[in-house]
Amino acid sequence: MEKRYKNCTIITGTGRVIDSGWLQVKNGTIAALGLMAEIKSDYSGDDIDLDGMTVMPGMIDCHLHLVMDGSPDPTLPLMGMDDSTATIIMINNAWKTLNAGFTTVRDLGCLNHVGLKVRDAINNGLVKGPRILCAGQMICMTGGHGWQIGIEADGPNEVRKAVRKQLKAGVDVVKLMATGGICTKGVEPGQTQYSLEEMTAGVEEAHKAGISTAAHAQGLNGVKIALHAGIDTIEHGMNLDDEAINLMLENNVPLIPTLSAGAHIISNGLQAGIPSYIVEKSICHRENRIKSCINAFKAGVAIALGTDAGTPFNLHGNNAFELSELYATGMTPHEIIISATAAAAKALKISDMTGTIEIGKQSDLLILKTNPLTDIKVLQQRKTIADIHIAGKSIFAENNFQMVLESNV
Ligand SMILES: [Zn+2]
């Protein structure tokens, strides 16, 4: 199986742009790429003329919740939900996300271990969806942020055991709740939840098994505890000071700012039925989170795209909204594309497989009618995307779901 795509602009994700180029895909992997001026004329395989379209790596959402549906109070529908219903919801949301141009996602907290089954079903070709890295259940202190769908564990030993349970189930990443958060009643984002001993136990246990860790960490003290414990990614982050930013730089820890979450809560507000404590906390911390993202980026911390999709009105399939949020912080379209591709793959420790258009990587591609380097917002429009490939396979050409696709536009 070999195909060559020619006459296209290639945004490689590495920082390089090939204005008039070609690329060759063999067995789902990028086999070669170059300039049209140097293209070989004696090629006998499938030769596809892209007629000036733009090719970029498939995008990666480092933080979402496929089981949450964007309800005003997003964990409420999950109370008492059975696993079968949760599975159907996750498959549907995974499909919407793929159609928005996201070929890889990291699910940072689902109901029971449903996400693992959905991940496996996609990998086995039973259903269509993006590549999923799955955290299974998030781990929090008793009554801590996310307890509604998390495992409650207190003290280093219980945290260790909770991590072991997730590892036993087969998770790709372990999510630990370092601080309070927005969508849980009675906790504050600035509040420290796990102690250094608890966080260290959790991170150590995951790392022993070669599994990466993510911390829901908003308040500064919780961020620092997570960093001192050896966490791999900081989710959200606010009030970041020089010490926290320097720790992130020293330990190569990216920030996943998830600015979409607050934006959708604030723009929809109380009138949309969002509980007042969610709206109030979002308004209170919005500026601070944006400022933290700007300061971290300016200092050289890698910013990886994550949306927290599933939170109120933060709908699956609208993940590219985060691109506009990052644009508003002053990042250039090219920097934002790197955040959504190469930096995100690096954050998830899968950059040997995807995130850039380089020889040997999986051919995860977006073929676009408009160049997003001119206007990053075109990626929010489904009509911009001519095709989406995962590991060389076109999801449009090779599926029977055209009706589903149309209904999701
Ligand atoms: Zn989240």
Image (cartoon, rainbow, N blue to C red):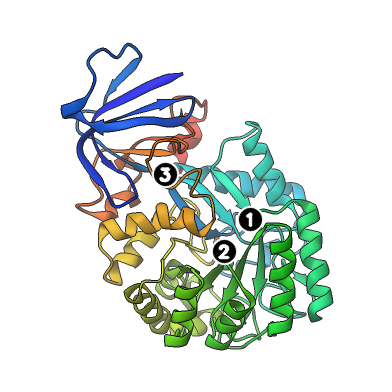
Q: Which quarter of the figure has residue 304? A: bottom left
- The residue under the point 70% across, 76% down is 200
For marks 3 and 1, the one nearer the N-term is 3
Camera-side mark, 2 or 3 = 3
Find disc 3 in the rendering and name its residue. 58
**In the image, what residue type sits under mark 3?**
Gly
Camera-side mark, 3 or 1 = 3
Left or right: 185 as drawn, with respect to 23:
right
**In the image, what residue type sits under mark 2?**
Ser
Find disc 1 in the rendering and name its residue. 67
Which image quarter holds the C terminus? top left
Q: Which quarter of the figure has residue 358? A: top left
Q: Is residue 293 above or below residue 351?
A: below
Left or right: 243 as drawn, with respect to 53:
right
Farthest front residue in view: 250
Q: Nearer the viewer, residue 265 or 288?
A: 288
Location of residue 153 in the rendering, given as x and y in whole percent from the top left corner: 79, 75
Q: Is residue 197 above or below residue 359?
A: below
Mark 3 CB lies closer than 8 A to ligand 1: no
- The residue under the point 57% across, 64% down is 71
Left or right: 15 as drawn, with respect to 204:
left
Query: Residue 71 bears which disc, if any?
Result: 2
Q: Secondary structure at mark 2?
A: loop
Residue 133 shows in the view: yes
Location of residue 179 in the rendering, given as x and y in whole percent from the top left corner: 62, 81
